[in-house]
Image (cartoon, helix red, strand yellow):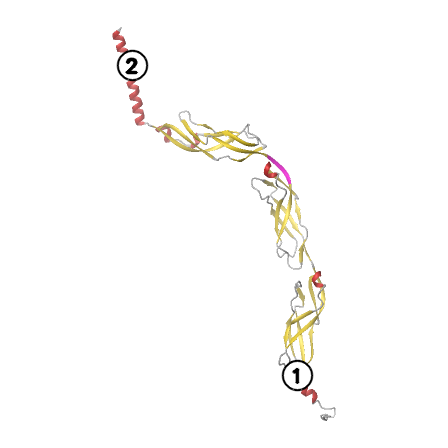
Amino acid sequence: MQLNWHNNSIKLLSVLLALILWIYVSNEQNPAGEQVLTIGLEQTGLAQDLLITEGMPEFIRVRVVGNKNQLSNLTAGQFKAVIDLANVVVGQNTIPVQVSAPSSLHVSQVNPEEVHLSIDSLIEKKIPVSVSLQGNPAQGYTALAPRCQPENVSARGPGKVVNLINQVTAVVDISLAIKDITETIKVSASVEDVAIDPSVVRVVVPIVSTAISKTVPVKLQITGTPASGFTVLNSYSDPGSVQIFGPAEVINNVYEISTEMIDISNINKNFDINVGLSPITGIFDYQPGQVKVYIKVNNEKQTEETPNSNGSVPAEQ
């Protein structure tokens, strides 16, 4: 009996030594190691009337332990990271990250192990469209109330955001417009994470003339004096009146329009000249835009020596 126990002990020791040797050789040829992978994070189970507003990371990192052969061809596609949102409520929620990996590997670390999400109700409501006009029409024109089609759009998004929206805006540039403007405009709610449907509206802005016209006389503006011995006998413009155009509040207070200054210094004969009209604030058009001015002068000495009908010069008294 003593001999059999001794033989069995030797056999058991041999097996143990062989196992240790096999483990040693395996570790030498195929040593254990670890690898860190970045994996996309998915979510499942979220109710249709809820949405995530904050806290959802796009990726997580996992640390994996395995031998050299197992890790050599490892890819992120062999793993799956998921959070189950079936039981979340509106507000703050802490959800563990669940990672599935090949059975031969050990996941030693998940970062983060849980995520902190903000959940809100997904709502939709009708919002009126407000048209904002930028710039001013051309002088003598004004914009009437714009028309919008459709007049309302749907806003869909987080309840705490959508409930703060009172209107969406369509901006139309009417700078220097002289006729009706019809445009398709993208509307804006000035907030993020809200979908607007439809996202564009058709806007019509009527542009009408505010001008009236009036005919007023032309007033000559003359400066200087003729040459010595000459006087101005007559001066006038052709035409003697012009038609002016502008807003009623300006036109009704204009009774004449002056020419640009006409210098007659040292003239000694009749002359004519085309001159423009002095601008009046608020008047944006004149018809015609200039007039022809005639200046007739008289030689005082010749007038004094003009002969009588019989050819004699009148005697001095």
Q: Nearer the viewer, residue 44 or 180?
A: 44
Q: Position of residue 102 (x, y in %)?
A: 42, 26
Residue 309 in the image: above or below residue 59: below
Q: Number of numbered discs present?
A: 2
Going by the numbered disc 2, the residue's amino acid type is Leu
Secondary element type, mark 2: helix
Position of 88 relative to 235 (above/below)? above
Q: Quadrant of residue 38?
A: top left
Instruction: Tell me the number on the disc at residue 12.
Output: 2
Dominant secondary structure, magenta: strand
Q: Which residue is located at x 62 percent, y 37 percent? A: 124
Secondary structure under tag 1 reads: strand
Determine the residue located farthest toward the top in the rendered image: 1
Marks 1, 2: nearer the viewer = 1
Separation of residues labelled 1 and 2 (CA atoms): 149 Å
Image quadrant holding the C terminus, namely bottom right
Kindly check if marks 1 and 2 are in contact, taking CB atoms under 8 A apart as contact: no
Q: Is residue 8 above or below residue 262?
A: above
Q: What span is in magenta?
A: 122-126
Q: Which residue is mark 1?
A: 230
Residue 160 seen: yes
- Give the quadrant of residue 233: bottom right
Q: Earlier in the sequence, mark 1 or mark 2?
A: 2
Q: Residue at x 30, y 27 (%)?
A: 29
